[in-house]
Image (spheres, rainbow, N blue to C red):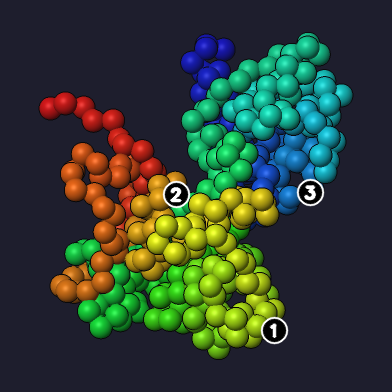
């Protein structure tokens, strides 16, 4: 078979493994998303994905799914097989015991406990092992895990809906609904695949949201409300069921409201102050990381969005752009203290998607490479 044909076939099966890996979204955190496909003579004989944190990894599920012996077959795995004992035994050892003819790995695991050791173990056992097939796509699928395992901080996605003229509410503060019903379902799917969702006190005060993913299937994320002084009413909808709800405040928070919230089962988390006397968001993210929260969806409002951007704490930006103009109103982002255009925060667009009547802009932090005219 010609080299180009082999490469094309390999990519086809790795793309299938990537599709399988995505099935674990919302269930495997803080572990990575991994998919595995076992192939013999161009036929898939087994496949699997990491379904839930603490359960079998993708390779083991694929082996158990196999319809015939896997000895001599080719394994396509999106991320390097683990080589250490955690909640489950090392996948590299399981692969070696199966004696595959070939293993194709998408990306190296950045976890210091693995980081090439799984690949080396396979090669030392005489198993042909290739690394780097569709590497960029495999790394992108695990962008949350890669950041978390390297920094200990959760991956932060900032999402908001705005009009064409950049407003998230009218001059009176009215904001329901800027975007279309399909975009609302998109927002709920986004919540379902994040560990936590975070909003500021103004959003709770103006919109009184539930912050659940009730429009789609999936678990509700941990709900986090940043309220430095703890001045929100304990009767807000988000506090009606204290389960999996955290109110973040400083040491100056209102004592009586703290007592009322804790009585409802809401956790009140005290975080140090930033220079302006508000909750220090970097310190908050550090605490969340230590709690194994690997991803946070920030849904606003404007003050919180501005603070996250100003602190360079955003990894991904999702803007739902509605085909509406309201004129005067509430800006999506406030003053960042930027006076020169060359100092503007840089993002690179990843994709543009139609969603109902709206356009969803998906961008990552980092200045795009510009080609001179």
In the displayed structure image, the side of residue 262 where residue 227 appears, left or right: left
> Is residue 25 placed above or below 128 in the rendered structure?
below
Q: Position of residue 329 (x, y in %)?
A: 22, 74
Q: Position of residue 37 (x, y in %)?
A: 68, 34
Contact (CB < 8 A) between labels 2 and 1? no
Q: Quadrant of the N terminus?
A: top right
Contact (CB < 8 A) between labels 2 and 3? no
Q: Quadrant of the C terminus?
A: top left
In the displayed structure image, the side of residue 314 where residue 250 appears, left or right: right
* Residue where numbered disc 3 is placed: 54
In the displayed structure image, the side of residue 339 where residue 352 appears, left or right: right
Closer to the eye: label 2 or 3: 2
> Is residue 273 placed above or below 147 in the rendered structure?
below
Q: Quadrant of residue 239?
A: bottom right
SS of the residue under disc 3? loop
Q: Position of residue 303 (x, y in %)?
A: 36, 66
Residue at horizontal 61 percent and vertical 55 percent from the top: 288
* Residue where numbered disc 1 is placed: 263
Give the camera-side residue of 270 and 23.
Answer: 270
Residue at horizontal 18 percent and vertical 43 percent from the top: 341
SS of the residue under disc 1? helix
* Residue where numbered disc 2 is placed: 313
């Amino acid at each position: 078979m010609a080299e180009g044909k082999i490469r094309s076939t390999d990519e086809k099966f790795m793309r299938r493994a990537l599709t399988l890996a995505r099935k674990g979204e919302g269930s495997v955190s803080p572990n990575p998303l991994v998919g595995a496909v076992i192939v013999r003579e161009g036929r898939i004989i087994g496949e699997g994905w990491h379904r839930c944190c603490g359960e079998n990894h993708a390779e083991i599920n694929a082996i158990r799914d196999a319809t015939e012996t896997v000895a001599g077959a080719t394994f396509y795995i999106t991320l390097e097989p683990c080589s250490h004992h955690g909640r489950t035994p090392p996948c590299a050892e399981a692969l070696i015991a199966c004696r595959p003819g070939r293993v194709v790995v998408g990306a190296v695991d950045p976890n210091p406990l693995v980081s090439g050791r799984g690949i080396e173990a396979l090669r030392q056992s005489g198993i042909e092992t290739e690394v780097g097939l569709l590497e960029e796509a495999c790394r992108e699928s695990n962008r949350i895990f890669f950041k978390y395992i390297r920094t200990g901080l959760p991956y932060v996605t900032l999402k908001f809906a705005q009009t064409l003229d950049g407003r998230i509410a009218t001059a009176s503060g009215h904001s329901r609904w800027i975007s279309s019903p399909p975009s609302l379902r998109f927002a709920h799917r986004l919540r379902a695949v994040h560990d936590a969702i975070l909003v500021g006190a103004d959003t709770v005060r103006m919109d009184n949201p539930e912050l659940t993913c009730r429009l789609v299937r999936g678990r509700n994320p941990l709900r986090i409300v940043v309220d430095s002084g703890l001045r929100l009413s304990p009767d807000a909808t988000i506090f009606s069921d204290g389960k999996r709800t955290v109110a973040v405040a400083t040491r100056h928070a209102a004592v009586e409201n703290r007592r009322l919230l804790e009585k409802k089962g809401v956790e009140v988390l005290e975080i140090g102050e930033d220079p302006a006397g508000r909750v220090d968001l970097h310190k908050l993210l550090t605490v969340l990381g230590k709690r194994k929260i690997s991803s946070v969806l920030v849904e606003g409002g404007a003050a919180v969005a501005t603070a996250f951007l100003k602190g360079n704490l955003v990894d991904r930006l999702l803007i739902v752009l509605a085909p509406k103009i309201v004129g005067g109103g509430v800006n999506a982002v406030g003053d960042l203290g930027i006076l020169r255009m060359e100092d503007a925060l840089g993002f690179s667009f990843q994709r543009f998607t139609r969603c109902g009547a709206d356009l969803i802009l998906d961008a990552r932090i980092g200045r795009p490479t510009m080609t001179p005219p």
